[in-house]
Image: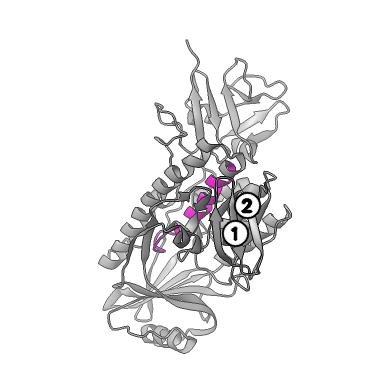
Amino acid sequence: MDTTVLIAGAGPTGLTLGIELARRDVAVRIIDKAETFFVGSRGDGLQPRTLEVFEDLGVLDAVLAQGAAPVPMKIHLGGEVVGERMMFDPVEPTPAKPYPTGWFLGQSQTEGILRDRLAEFGVRVELATALTGFEQDADGVTATLSTGETVRAAYLVGADGGKSLVRKALGIAFEGSTDESIRMLLGDVRAEGLDRGYGHWFATPENPMSGMMFSPLPGTPHFQFGAPLGDGDVDVETALPAVQARLDALTGGGVVLSDLAWSTVWRPNIRLAERFRDGRVFLAGDAAHVHPPTGGQGLNTGVQDGYNLGWKLADGSPELLDSYEVERRTVAARVLGVSTGLLQKYKDGDEDAHKRGEDTQQLDITYRGGPLSPAGTGALQPGDRAPDAPLTDANGKRVRLFELFRGPHATELSFGDGPGSGLRILPQGSVATGADLVDDDGHAYAAYEAEGGRTVLVRPDGYVWSVSVPVS
């Protein structure tokens, strides 16, 4: 039987999954109904945990080079600058958390980087190729494509967005709501006269929480803009003259807009699929959960769906495949709660609605209590994110745990002087020999609570699989 995994949808979710499979030598095809690749910002906020995932996938350097750190937001009221705000408080990296602050890069640029990485494994996105139907049996999935081709695959993954054909064909309920009381005008545009070293919020002194936001898009001449729409905004025009007129009404003129790359009127669609799996067919990303943009969670959650599913599909064991829905649906439900809570702050006009905290960084995602995570004790337990830490090898060279985790493998960390079948990490003051690593600064022993010695198995996706403590 063909061992191919067929992925419908070549957004960040499908591309992440494709890389995960291709680097494990799993035959994969990734198709997309679009005629051309999307150009625009959309999901431009990359959370700290996603940056860690991208390091493992081998794309972080490109993401950091093309993107930018958060910039302050200038507040313009009645044409006057009245202050600045930061969406994120500056956070210094720590040995355990090397990327504690989010990063900004337009979605189309992120997708381009992921496509380039996928191409390094010999896999390319097949554009203008839509999934038109499929049937599954005990041994695989037979899919039909708009090109007239019939594909036989071991598994099908629907990463085909909120209007997912895969989800609809399976009859899986998409539970939630569309809030018609909230609408936003969104898009990308050039803005002559705006300082690209800042984001900008334009409003009137009488109504400071209702206005227009412009945020510079790294690596492009454009700004992403957003404007909440009120009850009086009926049949909103999205063309450039209408966007310019809306801004002029807030500023009195002075900023000239041009080159509108895309624009739309957005309504918050907050939904969660009843199931993420039906036999040999899986849902991931927006096909499984759609979020309001508040908190920058949608793209990031989809990337991590693909990251979670990839190694499990490559292994193919029933236990791992069964764990995908339990782990990721639980996370998606929690993340939807965070996004919805922030959206409510915008609706209520809270002054801290723009503020982002640790609950949006996705570093605290845990699979505790899930089918792959036995019960544990202490601060670090099975199911938790495995921390980073600096170590020293026998040649005195510094190496990070994340560097050792990088790749498609699981990693066993053996702390202490006893024999270990994986990476043996010795405490401060030890002398490394052979493949041993020394925790000169004590960060690894602290992060993994290993003073008494312990063995920690880290999953291929960077979460703790098991912890065993030596019997005294």
Q: What SS does tag 1 mark? A: strand
Kind of residue indicated by mark 1:
Ala
Residue found at x 60% / y 15%: 418
Q: Is residue 4 visible?
A: yes
Q: Which residues are magenta?
A: 291-311
Camera-nearest residue between 433 and 365:
365
Residue found at x 30% / y 74%: 208
Q: Position of residue 64 (x, y in %)?
A: 61, 56
Q: Are marks 2 and 1 in contact (CB under 8 Å)?
A: yes
Residue at the disc numbered 2: 153
Q: Is residue 387 visible?
A: no
Asked whether, in this view, residue 391 is left or right of residue 255, the answer is: right
Against 343, is 210 above or below? below
Snapshot colouring:
one colour
Residue at the disc numbered 1: 143
Q: Position of residue 3 (x, y in %)?
A: 66, 47
Kind of residue indicated by mark 2:
Ala
